[in-house]
Image (tube, rainbow, N blue to C red):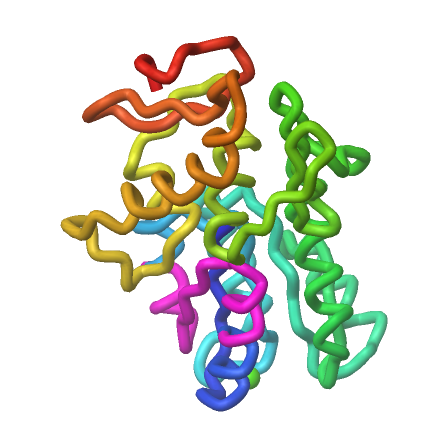
Amino acid sequence: MRILQVEDEPAAAKMLGKGLREQGYAVDTAHDGVDASYKAAVNQYDLIILDVVLRGQDGFGICRDLRTAGFSGPILMLTARDSVEDRIRGLDVGADDYLTKPFDYLELLARVRALLRRRRSPYVETIDVGDLRIDLKAHTVTRATLPIELTAKEYTILEYLASRRGELVSREDLSEHAWDENYDPFSNLIEVYILRLRKKIDAMHEVKLLRTRRGKGYMLCADSVTASDA
Ligand code: CA
C-alpha cells in the first residue's frame, strides 16, 4: 500500500515516514499543498496522512482540494488540538478520520490499517487464495496453515496482489501501490521480489498461485496451474 504524508516539519516527516516504511508501506512526502496536489495527481495513493498545521494553505484547504480533484481514498488528518470544531471541519472537507498531535505512533498505525481495511469492507480481516491465507490485521501469511516468513516489502506486494486476486496486475500498478516515488521503472526490482515471493509461497506446493504473464503482469489466483504456465 502506498501512502502520501503531507507534513512541513522535516524531522516529523522523516520519523513518520521511517516508521511507516518499516511496516511495509511505500511512503512519499509532500511539504505543502501545491506539492501534495501535484503528487496526488500523478501517483496512485491508497491513503493520505494530512497535517492540519502547514505553512501556506492549511490541511483543511488541501483536503477539500484533494477531494475536488477526485481523490477518493481515505484521508487521515493530524489535528493540532482536540477541538470539536476542528474535527467537524475536517470531516466536512472530506477527511475520514483524525488524530490529535502528539499522537501515539501505535495508534496511528492502527488507524492507518483500519482505514485501508475499510476500503475493502470493514469486516474483511483475511484474504484467502486457495490455501494461502493473508491476515490483514496481523500482516501474517500462511499456506496450508503453515506460517510463511515474509519481509515487509514482500508482504506489501503479496497483499496488493491478493486484494486483486484473479485479476491481472500490471507492473505499473504494482509499482504504483508497493513502491514510493524513488522506484526506478527500469530496474528489475519487481521481478526480483516476485521470484522471492514465488519461492516462499509456491515452491513447496503442487498448485502454483502466483503467475506471471510475460510482458503483461502478475496474477494471484487459486485455479490449478502447472509450473510450466507459471
Ligand atoms: Ca506541521
* Residue 20 vertical position relative to residue 101 in the rendered view, above or below: above
* Residue found at x 57% / y 74%: 19
Residue 130 placement, left or right of 66: right
Residue 192 placement, left or right of 24: left
Front residue of 62 and 126 = 126
Relative image position of residue 152 (x, y in whole percent)? 53, 57
Relative image position of residue 115 (x, y in whole percent)? 69, 50
Residue 108 placement, left or right of 69: right
* Residue found at x 58% / y 63%: 23
Front residue of 18 and 7 = 18
* Residue 187 vertical position relative to residue 165 in the rendered view, above or below: below
Q: Which residues are magenta?
A: 18-38
- Inspect the magenta stretch and tell me whether residue 188 lies in it: no
Image quadrant of ligand 1 equals bottom right
Q: Check the picture and name the quadrant holding the C terminus.
A: top left
* Residue 15 vertical position relative to residue 77 in the rendered view, above or below: below
* Residue found at x 69% / y 37%: 146
- Inspect the magenta stretch and tell me whether residue 33 lies in it: yes
Relative image position of residue 178 (x, y in whole percent)? 42, 49
Relative image position of residue 150 (x, y in whole percent)? 55, 51
Residue 44 placement, left or right of 138: left
Q: Residue furthest right?
A: 84
